[in-house]
Image (tube, coloured by chain):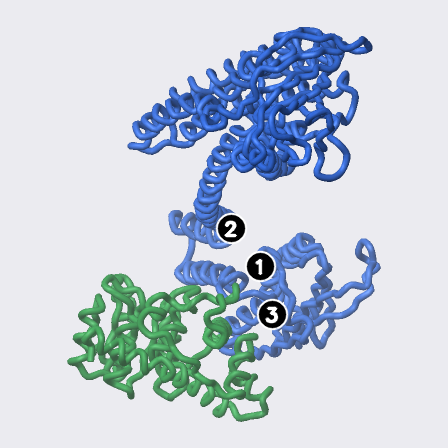
Amino acid sequence: MLYRGTRPFAFGLLIVLSALALAAGAIPSVAMRILARRDLLIWELPSARLSLQPDGLAWQDGTTISLPDAWDRSRPAFGGKARYTFTVTLSPAEANDRALYIPRVSNSCVILINGKALSLADNGPIPTWRWNRPLYRLVPADMLRPGQNEITVEVNGLRNSRAGLSESYFGPRDLLYSAYRLRSFFQIELLWVANVSAIVLAIPLLFSWIRDRQGSRTYGLFGAGSMLFGIRNFHGFANFLPMPVEIWWPLVSASLGWSLVFMYSFLLRISGHFWPRFERALVVFAGLGSILLFITPTVRFMSWSPWIWYLPLLLTGLFCVGAFTRQAFANPTPQSAVLLFGILAQIGPAVHDVLWIAGIGSFSSILWMALSYPLTLILMSVVLADDMAKTRAALGSMNSVLETRVAEARRDLEWVYESRRAAERDAAGMEERLRLMRDMHDGVGTRLSLLLSGLARSEISHSEVENAVRASLDELHLLLDARGPGTTTLVDALGNLRYRLGPRLSAIGVETRWEFDATAEALVLSAEATLNVLRIVQECISNAVRHGQARLITLSVASSMAKAPERAGGDNSMLFEVRVADNGVGLGNASAATRGGGHGTANIHARADALEATFTLTSSESGTVALLRLPPSSR
Amino acid sequence: MKILVVEDDPYWQQAIKGILSKYPDYQLVALCGDLQKALRSIATLEFDLLIVDLGLPDGSGIDAIRVARQRRPDVDILVASVFADEGNVVAAIFAGATGYLLKESDPEHWRASIEELRAGHSPIDPRVARHILGTIQNMRHSPAPASKDVTPLPSSLHKVARPGDPRLSQRELEVLQLVAKGFTLVEVARLLEVSAHTARTHAKAIYRKLEVSSRGEAVFEASQIGLI
């Protein structure tokens, strides 16, 4: 994203770099002028006598011609040998310092000095194939003589293979050698560097594509194009034909087309043009074009290939560059300006090379696009490095943003969790309150209602009011005994009850005892079950005092590994027994005045049923034992 | 016996006045309806027993207890509590209360509690014992959260005087644990094979240790708020 102030700068940069890039198109012609040094002109070989030997035929004496002689233009469809003979005059001193420099001779040649062959190889076999590379050879003094000398360059060329001989120089060794070195630098050393650069720089792009097929596809296309381009450009080095020209030429041409198709797709995508149909059409064109190149008759290849292959490729490239340029100007950024410079700088070399392939221009010209292309690649790498640096910076800030968000999310989650827990607590509290209200309504509420009703009808005495109020308070205390703060176990609750009733019982001469075993101490019942147990115990104590006239009441809780055949399952799990034993007169001996109507016992059984417990009452003359057996399910 | 009562509810004011008037040896020296009046009365009046309601309109009765304990170490302080108020009762014990009773108790119970207090016996019931045990446990494991069955100390106590560990003796802890399970002090004495008097002494000692444990911070806090 552009920030304020960058856009005008980027736009200016775009204009300047575009102009520079287009101006760079003139570099080849300037370079050629430098290569064609003025001080060489006096050493250029004069016009030559030409003899021709078409393939399989006898030598024919030709005419006098001047160089360069590009066969495609001077004698189209000629294949065979052409013998160029130059006559030079030497002084005895000059014979010691002579060399031959030929910027280009194609496809291969033999050189004769005064009829004797001049070795063309320092060591190794004599080159069998020369496409476009300079030739420089020292001419030994013993091959020359004072006065007139005859230099013959016998060129062997295939039909329609752009054979021919460029302007040639015969002169002082050092001067010619420096000219040869300069050309050799462009055509050999620099080409090596360019090709290796293209391949090396393409590797990380391709690697990123392999790692991230979708995200790095655009760079991957560029990498693939560069890699192919760099590899195929090594063909200029070949000093022999690796395969028959029928395959070699189509292969060299087709590989260029495919590398360009990759790069065109890259250009479109990097400028935001995702045109799948166009890209498919490019691939179809490359495929069909390649087939066409391979089936083109070799003798027609050099004349047809520019029209069926190179020119359409150039036009398509211009279209893609146009699309990229338009987008770059529509949304100028320093990155797009830099990239546009690199791309526009290719137009001049590309046009030059296509014209050269078409046979237009100097016979010995250098192919420039292979040399200029690394510039684009280097600029692309700069943009990519910038992109990576930005991405890393963005990732860094995104990480910190993400960390913040994660922390926020965690806080939110904790809040939600706490809220939910609070809600659950509230719900549990609400349920507890509802139970408490129901208990209060059933217990205290009912008693108070009856009391009010009695008072309203003036049917109850003062002592009845006092008893009713006391009973209501007892009811409230019972609720608190069962579920007050700090009351967790059944023993806690029974301890509360016993402690509360103790002084009252003691006041009427009844002693209470309280026992429990260690296992029973940990028994925890629900609040509702605890309340039921407490009511049962309270009723039993009340019965012991009122009906049994007990003087000692023992309340105990005990546990046992009881076999419980009377309960479903009959398992051997822990049973708990709550026992209220008194030393009263027993149920059967209760006087008519103290004997109850049985309501209390019925209530106890109902509560025991609610607990799924069993309640038994054993009575004798020496006392009564009330036993409540709690099953595991009541816990 | 001169009694100072701190109670804001007019109904309970009348009720307490009525209960105390039944006994000629009880002399009500003042009945304060709020904390400020209570603090002034504590500072100016002579009294043997302070009966305090904890919920006052302008503060907590615990502050009155603490100041009274600081100024008059010899007086008895009785907290008049309501149902299920063990948390506040224990906080009051930490502040220096020596006894407590339910407001709703009948006049005889009121008298019995007052006389017990005068005789040097502090009451202690299972709920209060459990709460004291829970509070001590919390202090020892602080800042671990309170166990679910223990009501946390009231905020006033947390703010003003978080007590230190009272360092109860093993025997005192046993007394508390047995009381917490519902045994009376007489039964506790029997179970521990000591006299009933000794058991009662332990109860009183527990009260004193709880109060002493919170005193240092309480003095500091009282001086901070300008009470002493």
Task: Identify the chain of the residue marked 1, using the numbered disc in the image.
Answer: A
In the image, the chain rendered in green is B
Local SS, label 3: helix
Q: Nearer the viewer, residue A537 or B190?
A: B190
Q: Mark 1 highlights which residue?
A: A531
Mark 2 and 1 residues: CB-CB less than 8 Å, in contact? no
Q: Closer to the N terminus: mark 3 or mark 2? A: 2
Task: Identify the chain of the residue marked 2, using the numbered disc in the image.
Answer: A
Is A185 left, or right, of B142 in this rendering?
right
Quadrant for the N terminus of chain A, please.
top left
Q: Position of residue B203 (x, y in %)?
A: 45, 85
In the image, the chain rendered in blue is A
The residue mark sitting in front, 2 or 1, is: 2
The answer to whether one can see residue A265 in this image is no
Quadrant for the C terminus of chain A, please.
bottom right
Mark 2: give few (<14), some (14-19) or many (20+) Cα within 10 Å: few
Is B56 left, or right, of A137 in this rendering?
left
Residue A491 badge: 3
Name the residue at 53% across, 19% down.
Answer: A350
Q: Relative to residue A250, is residue B216 depicted above or below?
A: below
Task: Identify residue type, mark 1.
Answer: Leu
Name the residue at 60% across, 32% down.
Answer: A99
Q: Relative to residue B93, is residue A241 depicted above or below?
A: above
Q: Mark 2 highlights which residue?
A: A421
